[in-house]
Image: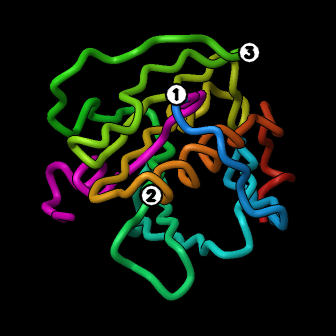
Amino acid sequence: MTTNTGNLVLAVALTWSSGMSAMETKSPTKTDTRSINHYDLDLPASYSLRDISPPMMDFVLYEIDKVGRTDEKLVLYFGSAPSFPALKWSTPAIKRSKGRASITEFPYSQKERQMEGLVSVTGLMYHGRDSPFSYVHYIATGLDERDARDFEEIVESIRVERPTIDRKDCR
């Protein structure tokens, strides 16, 4: 994971994927719902979520990893100007739609041990204007199949719960 300022958003970002059907195993049953601006996601109890956003930016970054392990991370970028794709891929991206979202993804590759995707959501409003959080870019590298499956399920759980955020909604 590199952190140069010019490409901090995607060099740090390591995962978003939805609909990876290659792996069909149940995830841990106990989950907590976490909220990030317009979105909610389901986080298994064995995973932690940390805000790793740099100060004073117009995007937010979150890192997800398994409690007690920090070698495999899923990084989520919520913003309006992602550099996508950030990783090198030997296959073309897959495009699909889900509700108000357009999804472009590179599903987990066992050979490359990585996954990446971009979700673009339309119609989000933030303080009376178009939202600066209309994209979710996810990236994960160095994954084994089990971690990839868990991260895919976390990414698939991301959903819009607050399409409009007003000043009164901010904490």
Residue holding disc 3: 99
Residue holding disc 1: 119
Please tell me which residue lies in front, 105 or 162. 105
Quadrant where the N terminus sits is: bottom left
Write down the region rendered in magenta: 1-21
Q: Nearer the viewer, mark 3 or mark 2?
A: 2
Assess disc 2: are there few (<14), some (14-19) or many (≥20) residues with their C-alpha within 10 Å of its C-alpha: many
Assess disc 1: are there few (<14), some (14-19) or many (≥20) residues with their C-alpha within 10 Å of its C-alpha: many
Which residue sits furthest bottom?
68
Q: Earlier in the sequence, mark 3 or mark 2?
A: 2
Q: Amino acid at mark 1?
A: Val
Residue 90 located left or right of residue 125: left
Give residue 75's position: percent from left, percent from top. Answer: 43, 56
Assess disc 3: are there few (<14), some (14-19) or many (≥20) residues with their C-alpha within 10 Å of its C-alpha: few
> Cβ–Cβ below 8 Å for labels 1 and 3?
no
Give residue 147's position: percent from left, percent from top. Answer: 48, 59
Q: Earlier in the sequence, mark 2 or mark 1?
A: 2
